[in-house]
Amino acid sequence: MLDYLIYGKIIIDDIRLANGEVIRGVLGGGGPQAAFGARLWSDSIGFLSRSGTDIEDEHVQTLRNIDIDVSGWQRYQDIPTPRTRMSYDKNEYLQTGDSGLLTMVVSREDWLRLLAQVLTLPSTYQQPKAIHLITEFPEEPMVETALELQKQGAIFSLEPLVDFREWSNRNGILNLIQKVDIVTPDWPSASGIAQSDNPKQVMEYWSKLGPRLIAVRHGHHGSYVWDRDHDQILHVPAVPTEVVDPTGGGNSYGGGLCVGWAEGHEARIAGCYGVISAKFLVERVGPPKMSVALQQEAQALLEQTLSSVRLL
């Protein structure tokens, strides 16, 4: 049986970097990045996702290089793999308008048809320690699957993709958040829902929503974490690195956070797992190949990162 399940999308991205360079055909979508973030700390990771059979061999190899179990990944002959174009603002958030936010290359019909495909858990995915979901759809079938696993003792970890511009899914996401064990929103969503730009006030608001662990991701500012047992709001600084491509940094953080919480049940530890996972993702384009050396480097960074955590 696998200990950790990661559920997220597979999308092939064309990315405009901060220096203006455009990198085409990068494996993305959030799912592979979150799986990498979790795999950095555990060798027992199962991956749940969907794509078309048209996905290129190089992207299949990139996914396999993360060294995860992919028996939960379903490919469909009659539905194309989603593709997007994206670029970022100076704060490393996706831009809106013609240049930016998830400009879909496939049709909306194909996109929705792919997302409607129900995924069944393989036999080795039936008793995980934790399941981590990246979703904007609070009522999709995988949410129900996660809730069932939670009843059996699994930790339910959620990275909510909140529409923080139109707030179209705000109420549904907030209802779901009350049911999960871990929630890790990004800063625009967390601050917008709390109606504050003050990190401490934002965390005080979110700490009352229900989950045992709150981790708000704030790009190069690091993250803010809180857990119910210790009841302290902490700032976990980002691990110093040169950011090449911010795509997937938050997703990688969420995967690492989930494993860190399951292993230590302490916000301080989980947040450090998260920022270290994010560090390895943003310092290059696309998910890195997993290796023993990479895991050893992550472990070596842990003590130093733990010592950098401060009360907010």
Image (cartoon, rainbow, N blue to C red):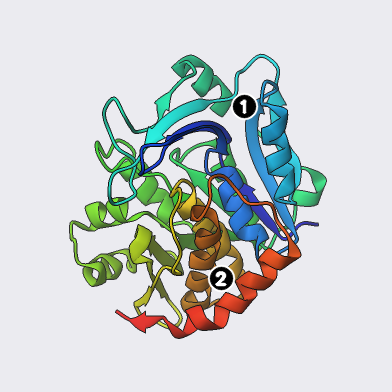
Residue in front for this viewpoint, 44 or 193: 44
**Amino acid type for the residue under numbered disc 1:** Gln
Element type at mark 2 = helix
Query: Please, is residue 18 above or below residue 239 in the view?
Result: above
Left or right: residue 48 compared with residue 20: right
Give the percent coordinates (x, y) of residue 97.
26, 28
Relative horizontal placement of residue 192, taking residue 307 as reference (left or right): left
> Which of the labelled discs sits on residue 117, or is there none?
1
Residue drawn at point x = 20 percent, y = 67 percent: 198
Callout 1: SS: loop
How many numbered callouts?
Answer: 2
Residue shown at the point (34%, 69%) measured from the top left: 207
Q: Quadrant of the N terminus?
A: bottom right
Residues packed near mark 2 inside 10 Å, few (<14), some (14 to 19) or many (20 plus): many
Q: Quadrant of residue 226?
A: bottom left
Quadrant of the snapshot with the C terminus: bottom left
Q: In x, y percent, where is residue 86?
A: 40, 33
Question: Real-space Cα distance between discs 2 and 1?
Answer: 30 Å
Apparent side of residue 123 relative to residue 246 in the rendered image (left or right)? right
Q: Amino acid at mark 2?
A: Trp
Q: Nearer the viewer, residue 123 or 88?
A: 88
Label located before the other in sequence (2 or 1): 1
The answer to whether 118 is drawn above or below residue 17 in the figure is above
Q: Which residue is disc 2 drawn over?
A: 261
Residue at (48, 62) in percent of width and height: 182
- Residue 202 location in percent, x, y? 25, 65
